[in-house]
Image (tube, rainbow, N blue to C red):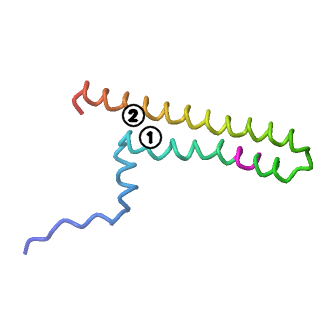
Amino acid sequence: MVQSPPASPRRFLLVEIWEENREIFKTLITHPLLFSIPIASLLLFDLIIRRSALEEAEKHLLLRIDLYGVALILVIFTGSLIIEILVLVSWKVKHGK
């Protein structure tokens, strides 16, 4: 009687991909997580400004600065994500992996 090899324990697809060191997958996961930290802090800053007892002109100025901060973070993180993916893809093409 021939015995079949024992089946490997079933794991989540995400865990398998992570353990296989698929760098593009890791980049696509870690960048949004890192992006959420400054965005969450700016949203908290926005909430604090809106509930403060400042004059309307001061609130407007601070909210405008907050908006530009969110836009700047969006541009920086999107640009770094695109650059990192391009580097990883070109590295794989160059090394034939």
What is the three-letter code of the residue carrying label 2?
Answer: Ile
Residue, x 34% and y 46% (percent of image)? Answer: 20
Q: Indicate the secondary structure of the residue bearing disc 2.
A: helix
Q: Amino acid at mark 1?
A: Thr
Q: Are marks 2 and 1 in contact (CB under 8 Å)?
A: yes
Instruction: Residue 69: say if magenta.
Output: no
Q: Tell me where the magenta segment starts and ends, as one range.
A: 41-45
Q: Earlier in the sequence, mark 2 or mark 1?
A: 1
Percent position of residue 48, x then y: 82, 50
Which residue has dot 1 on it? Answer: 27
Which label is found at residue 36?
A: none
Viewer-proximal residue, 41 or 50? 50
Disc 2 to disc 1, C-alpha distance: 7 Å
Q: Residue at x 36, y 63 (%)?
A: 11
Q: Secondary structure at mark 1?
A: helix
Q: Choose between 25 and 42: the one closer to the eye.
A: 42
The outermost residue toward the left is 1
Give the labeled residue for mark 2: 85
Residue 44 screen position, x and y as percent = 74, 49
> Can you say whether 14 is above or below 64 in the image?
below
